[in-house]
């Protein structure tokens, strides 16, 4: 959280939990990569965030 606070002084910071993870409700859709990306894109569009952004993964979202 401290990292997010530091970044938010200069940038717009959005914290995102995938559907069914963290504080997010489950999704009615299967957990395919395509569906997960679509859900993220839909959320970003609803917040008015364009196609230019940086994703920083954490925990499970950062594993390769």
Image: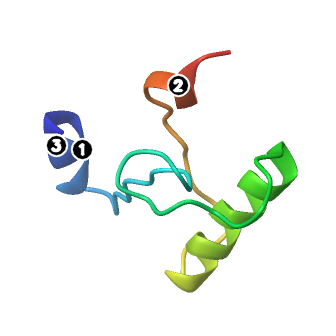
Dot label at residue 4: 1
Q: Is residue 14 above or below residue 55?
A: below
Q: Position of residue 45 (x, y in %)?
A: 62, 79
**Label 3 SS:** helix
Residue with the mark numbered 3: 6
Q: Give the percent coordinates (x, y) of residue 13.
A: 34, 57
Q: Nearer the viewer, mark 3 or mark 2?
A: 2
Q: What is the secondary structure assignment of the residue under circle 2?
A: helix
User: Distance between the Cα atoms at labels 3 and 1?
Assistant: 5 Å
Tell me the CA gap for discs 3 and 2.
Answer: 22 Å
Sequence-first tag of 3 and 2:
3
**Mark 3 touches mark 2? (CB < 8 Å):** no
**Is there CB contact under 8 Å for labels 3 and 1?**
yes
Q: Residue at x 47, y 63 (%)?
A: 25
Q: Which residue is mark 2?
A: 60
Question: For this view, does 41 lie left or right of residue 34?
Answer: left
64 versus 28 height, above or below? above
- For the N terminus, the quadrant is top left
Marks 2/1: CA distance? 18 Å
18 with respect to 27 (left or right): left
The residue located at (72%, 53%) in the rendering is 36
């Amino acid at each position: 959280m401290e990292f997010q606070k530091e970044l938010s002084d200069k940038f717009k910071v959005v914290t995102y939990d995938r559907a069914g993870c963290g504080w997010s409700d489950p999704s009615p859709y299967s957990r395919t990569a395509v569906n997960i990306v679509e859900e993220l894109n839909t959320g970003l569009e609803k917040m008015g965030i364009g196609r230019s952004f940086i994703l920083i993964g954490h925990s499970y979202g950062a594993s390769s």
